[in-house]
Image (cartoon, helix red, strand yellow):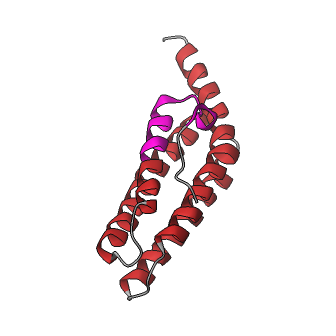
Amino acid sequence: MAMVEWNENLSVKIDEIDEQHKKFLDIINKIAETKPGDRTKVGELLNDLIDYAAYHFSTEERLMDESKAPQAEKHKESHARFVAKVSLAKKDFDRGKEIDPDELMEWAGNWMVRHIMRRDKLSADSIRCGQTKIMRKPKA
């Protein structure tokens, strides 16, 4: 799979989330640059992927909770499935299993693009709507 290039079609029109998506894609793209058998680099990138996913997903989930996004639970379930799959890959890797960087990059890249297009854009609409309501609340 070719590296996943950021473009405006992936934008959710929330700067904080877009910037995090760019960083997430940078980590995924570094996987594509990794040579098969480079266990040190694969291990580092699996850790980076797990750590950054936790950080990014917590940001999205906080914003969804604050805006009372109606699709938040399904969105959170999607996040949990991603973390579970990458965590399992890391556990297998730590037990000596080889991880093919191309397969990992293809799966993670495809997941990320689909997730942004299907889940994040829908949630972003609710988040932006919720932020507008919060900004318009009259002061007491």
Q: How many marks?
A: 0
Q: Quadrant of residue 81?
A: bottom right
Residue 45 at what x, y percent from top left?
37, 64
Magenta-drawn stretch, dominant element (helix, strand or loop): helix
Q: Viewed as shown, does residue 139 lie left or right of 42? A: right
In the rendered view, tell whether residue 127 sits above or below residue 87.
above
Instruction: Give the position of the N terminus as an image quadrant.
Output: bottom right
Residue at horizontal 29%, vertical 73%? Answer: 40
- Counting from the top left corner in percent of width and height, residue 111 is at 61, 58
Q: Would you place residue 36 above or below residue 6 in this image?
A: below
Q: Is residue 24 above or below residue 102?
A: above
Q: Residue furthest left?
A: 40
22 within the magenta span:
yes
Task: Please indicate, yes or no, whether residue 106 appears anywhere in the rendered image.
Answer: yes
- Give the residue at x 58% y 41%: 64
Please tell me whether residue 30 is drawn above or below residue 81 in the rendered image.
above
Question: Residue 74 in magenta?
Answer: no
> Which residue ends up furthest to the bottom in the rendered image?
96
Answer whether residue 84 is visible to the viewer in this image. Answer: no
x then y, percent, for residue 11: 58, 34
- Residue that appears at 40% across and 54% down: 52
Please give left or right for residue 59 compared with residue 94 in the image.
right
Residue 113 lies left or right of residue 86; in this view the side is right
Decide which of 138, 113 is in the foreground and name it: 113
Most foreground residue, 130 or 79: 79
Residue 80 percent coordinates (x, y): 56, 63
Residue range corresponding to the magenta coloring: 7-23
